Image (tube, grey):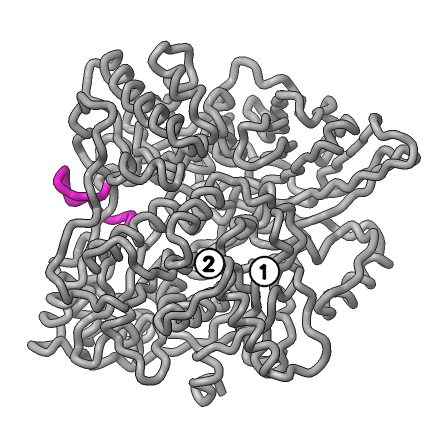
């Protein structure tokens, strides 16, 4: 193996703000790892996957893109006009219609939330990065760019948008008037963006048999055509779901729940099975006609917890919205694919609520139970800025709830202290064998680290050591082995996805994902070596007496339940047995004093959850109030945020994991653990508070913290309360635990 300069290879760094992981996946790391089985038959199968490799996909590559612009309203309008001109200029060069278009409503909403989404060919993005007169205004005006996943060809509109003659023309309005009384004026919508929803479940039904779900967007389903208001995927309205329920269960729509929901346990011969096998729903459940899916799905559990009604509540006043993410974006636990889709999902939920209510000033609580380990941790990523901007514009009427994360004990964060007396440090980052997904390491900089001239050298198992990579100096190095690129070491410029500069290490899987295929040349199938990767840090620019802290973050890389085995989490091993023993004791404590420990329990908060206005929920045990062992906390770099805002029960006790959530079938219940079930319970409490007309300084986040503080004061938990970095404002009493204790026994 040999380290070389990346000159001459695929370079996506010219695209403003390319996410480090997305740049690797689109470049040398993507041909085998990312495209997967969908490259087979590309172009021959109408429903095949759109690929993100320009040389292989032959122009059929499309992707979701999110760009953010200056807070200045005038510049925001200029960016919108520049993008439209760029689309037309590219289309003229290619001799065909524009390759994509703005997400419906973006023209009207761009100035409000300063983020827009476009569905476009990847070649258009490369064209934007080139030296084209019509591309330059957009490239110079935009601040950041995120790339989303490849989307099914049939999931995308087949025709591009008509060429706009008026650069200032607003986009289509997603909030048409509806008949008065369709949704009560004091209703509070609850939305969940997740994977796998049991639309026919009894938890999402009204007493009369109709569905509480007012809108459902399947982002992966086949597109409805050019008249659809959505750029990809397919939508079900509440009336569509009610009609399918009526067909499955008779005139009243009432269903007889199945005793066994899993197709592996019993034939799917129930009314719920008939619902999912309905021909009208085939685009949404293409593989479910012969039987229901697994017994439990993450989205169903989260929606069940968020949708729960307090005693006496009117289900008509708590309508639901569900957004299903593409499975590939969920399976990729690095989060590289999912960020643009989350922004699109949030904007859809807001638009769907306004449409159903027939007004703009709706109350809405959105739960996104998803998280990653690595990022700038400063609230400045494009995803977090977009969410914060939406929340600012809605003035407390809308809340977005995220989990604190489950990565506290994953050994994914390490610390090194450098000083003038000891300006160098050596750490080990271990990549596991049989890891079938790429691994990523990030070191986010600061002014102090740049002034200290922080440099990094990397030595893979068996060598050789890389040349030094300096923070703040644009540079990319490739590790080549067997003719292919095995790893990339890069210094990310400040236009990256976050508020500072970063050093990143991207590594191919240690095990091939699939057998060799003719589409892949032999050199594209090489694997990275598993084992100890040595990281040598130095800061020769430190002044006498100066000390700087360097945090190293391994990106999330695990295999999710319900998906084929793929990722194995890379980690930082303990530098000594003594430190491991201390860590094993510290992990039992709510707030350990780790001091100079290398492997960290703190600073592990979900990297999607460091924004200023989102509500962040950590996990605790219902019986004792103790923070759950896995529940991540701060500190983070965002001003005004130390960690999560509150804790909510995610375990019944220290030894009885999980709270009871809905299975896919109405008769099935399962214990589910993790901060991802704390978030929807916090969302439920917020929805109930908004329905009661409660408000607090600081918008929805301030309201959530006030609820938690009041519950903390009233509970009388034994022992001291967790610190604000771990437990936020307090431990929240939730309906599922306090109101349904028998169900959790």
| Residue reaching furthest to the bottom | 742
Does 228 lie within the magenta span?
yes
The quadrant of the image that shows the N terminus is top right
Secondary structure under tag 1 reads loop
Image side of residue 502 versus residue 28, left or right: right
Q: Quadrant of residue 124?
A: top left
Image point (48%, 20%), residue name: 14
Start-end of magenta stretch? 219-230
Label drawn at residue 238: none
Q: Mark 1 or mark 2: name the one nearer the start of the chain.
A: 1
Residue where numbered disc 2 is placed: 699
Q: Residue at x 74, y 69 (%)?
A: 589
727 sits left or right of 242 in the view: right
In the image, residue 483 sits, relative to residue 428, either above or below, namely above
Residue 28 in magenta stretch: no
x, y percent for residue 279: 12, 59
Residue 610 visible from this viewpoint: yes
Q: Secondary structure at mark 2?
A: helix
10 Å crowding of disc 2: few (<14), some (14-19), many (20+)? some
Q: Front-most of 80 and 657?
A: 80
Residue 202 against residue 11 in the figure, above or below = below
Q: Position of residue 705 (x, y in %)?
A: 54, 66
The residue beneath circle 1 is 644
């Amino acid at each position: 193996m040999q380290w070389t300069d990346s000159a001459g290879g695929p370079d996506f760094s010219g695209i403003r703000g390319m996410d480090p992981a997305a740049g690797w996946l689109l470049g040398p790391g993507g041909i085998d790892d990312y495209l997967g089985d969908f490259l087979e038959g590309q172009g021959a199968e109408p429903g095949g996957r759109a690929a993100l490799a320009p040389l292989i996909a032959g122009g059929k590559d499309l992707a979701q893109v999110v760009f953010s612009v200056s807070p200045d309203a005038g510049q925001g309008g200029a960016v919108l006009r520049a993008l439209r001109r760029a689309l037309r200029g590219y289309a003229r060069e290619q001799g065909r219609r524009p390759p994509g278009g703005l997400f419906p409503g973006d023209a009207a909403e761009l100035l409000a939330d300063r983020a827009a989404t476009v569905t476009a060919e990847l070649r258009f993005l490369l064209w934007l990065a080139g030296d084209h007169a019509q591309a330059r205004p957009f490239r110079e005006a935009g601040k950041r760019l995120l790339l989303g996943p490849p989307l099914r060809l049939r999931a995308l509109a087949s025709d591009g948008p008509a060429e706009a003659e008026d650069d200032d023309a607003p986009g289509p309005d997603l909030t048409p008037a509806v008949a008065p009384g369709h949704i009560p004026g004091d209703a509070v919508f609850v939305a969940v963006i997740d994977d796998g929803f049991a639309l026919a479940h009894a938890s999402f039904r009204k007493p009369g048999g109709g569905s509480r779900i007012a809108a459902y967007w399947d982002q992966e389903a086949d597109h409805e055509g050019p008249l659809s208001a959505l750029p990809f995927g397919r939508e079900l309205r509440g009336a569509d779901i009610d009609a399918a329920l009526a067909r499955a269960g008779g005139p009243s729509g009432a269903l007889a729940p199945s005793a066994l929901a899993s197709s592996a346990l019993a034939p799917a011969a129930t009314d719920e099975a008939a619902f999912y096998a309905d021909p009208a729903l085939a685009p949404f459940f293409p593989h479910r006609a012969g039987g229901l899916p697994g017994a439990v799905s993450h989205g169903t559990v989260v929606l069940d917890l968020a949708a729960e009604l307090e005693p006496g509540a009117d289900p008509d006043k708590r309508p639901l919205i569900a957004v299903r993410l593409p499975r590939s974006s969920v399976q990729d636990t690095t989060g590289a694919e999912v960020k643009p889709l989350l922004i699109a999902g949030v904007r859809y939920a807001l638009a769907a609520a306004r449409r159903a209510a027939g007004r703009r000033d709706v109350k809405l609580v959105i739960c996104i139970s998803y998280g990653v380990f690595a990022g700038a941790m400063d609230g400045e990523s494009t995803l977090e800025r977009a969410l914060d901007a939406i929340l600012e514009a809605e003035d407390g009427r809308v809340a977005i709830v995220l989990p604190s994360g489950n990565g506290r004990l994953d050994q994914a964060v390490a610390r090194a202290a450098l000083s003038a007396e000891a300006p160098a440090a050596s750490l080990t980052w271990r990549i596991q064998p049989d890891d079938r997904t790429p691994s990523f390491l990030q070191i986010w900089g600061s002014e102090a680290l740049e002034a200290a001239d922080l440099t990094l050298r990397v030595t893979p198992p068996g060598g050789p050591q890389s040349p030094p990579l300096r923070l703040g100096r644009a540079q990319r190095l490739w590790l080549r082995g067997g003719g292919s690129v095995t790893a990339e070491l890069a210094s990310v410029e400040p236009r990256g996805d976050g508020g500072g500069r970063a050093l990143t290490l991207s590594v191919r899987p240690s095990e091939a994902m699939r057998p060799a295929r003719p589409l892949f040349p032999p050199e594209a199938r090489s694997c990275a070596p598993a084992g100890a990767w040595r990281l040598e840090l130095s800061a020769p620019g430190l002044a006498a007496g100066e000390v700087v802290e360097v945090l190293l973050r391994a990106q999330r890389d695990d295999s999710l339940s319900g998906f084929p085995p793929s990722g194995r989490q890379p980690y930082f091993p303990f530098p000594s047995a003594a430190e491991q023993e201390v860590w094993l004791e510290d992990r039992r404590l709510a707030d350990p004093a780790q001091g100079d420990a290398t492997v960290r329990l703190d600073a592990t908060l979900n990297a999607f959850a460091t924004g200023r206005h989102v509500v962040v929920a950590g996990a605790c045990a219902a019986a004792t109030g103790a923070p759950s062992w896995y529940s991540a906390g701060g500190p983070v770099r965002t001003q005004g945020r130390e960690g999560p805002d509150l804790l909510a029960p995610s375990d019944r006790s220290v030894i009885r994991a999980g709270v009871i959530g809905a299975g896919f079938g109405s008769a099935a219940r399962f214990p589910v653990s993790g901060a991802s079930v704390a978030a929807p319970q916090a969302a439920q409490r917020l929805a109930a508070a908004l329905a009661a007309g409660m408000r607090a300084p600081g918008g929805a986040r301030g309201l959530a913290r006030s609820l938690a503080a009041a519950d903390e004061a009233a509970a009388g938990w034994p022992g001291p309360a967790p610190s604000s970095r771990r437990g936020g404002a307090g431990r929240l009493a939730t309906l599922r635990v306090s109101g349904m204790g028998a169900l959790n026994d």
